[in-house]
Image: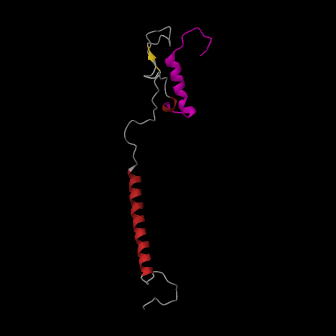
Amino acid sequence: MNINNNGAVDFNAVKAAFEGCYATMGVTCAEVGGLWDGEKYYSGNGAAATPSNAATMYSAAPCVDASTSTSSDDGMSAGAIVGIIIAAGFSVLMLGCVLFMIKQEKAGKPMFYAIGTVKPGA
């Protein structure tokens, strides 16, 4: 695209060329956005964009990323949920064991004692 070129500049082709480079540049369409006039995205019959073909429609609205999902599947996978449930259950079980050991210690019946000593009350 030559800035001094007196020929027609195809707005849609230039926009598509830029949008085709977004992935290489590491940006998304949502990050770039579009041309906004305060009420809507610029668009028109193409008179300013392609003087040689006034019937060409153009839109300056932001593109849509191919990787952008419009579905509501933003949740965790079933494996992650099962893993969290198992970890939570194990944590509750270990907390119960610790609380039981504390209770036994306070009652004078320790669960762990030095080897070679006689267990109290035996």
- Image quarter (top left, top right, bottom left or bottom right) of the N terminus: top right
What scheme was used to colour the molecule? Answer: secondary structure
- In the rendered image, which quarter contains the C terminus? bottom left
Does 115 sit above or below residue 94? below
Most extreme residue toward the front is: 38
Q: Is residue 25 left or right of residue 77?
A: right
Residue 86 in picture, x, y percent from top left: 39, 60
Q: Outermost residue toward the bottom?
A: 122
x 45%, y 80%: residue: 105
Say how many tags the image has: 0
* Above or below: residue 33 compared with residue 50: below
Where residue 83 sits in the image (x, y, percent)?
Answer: 41, 57
Look at 52% across and 26% down and name the residue there. Answer: 19
Q: Nearer the viewer, residue 38 or 6?
A: 38
Read off the magenta span. 1-29
Q: Is residue 51 magenta?
A: no
Above or below, comparing residue 55 to residue 75 in the picture: above
Q: Position of residue 57 (x, y in %)?
A: 43, 15
Q: Is residue 11 magenta?
A: yes
Please tell me which residue is depicted at 52% across the width and 27% down the height of the picture. Answer: 20
Q: Is residue 82 above or below residue 51?
A: below
At 51% from the left edge and 17% from the top edge, which residue is drawn? 11
Residue 108 point in image, percent of width and height: 44, 84
Of residue 13 and residue 89, the one placed in the foreground of this image is 89
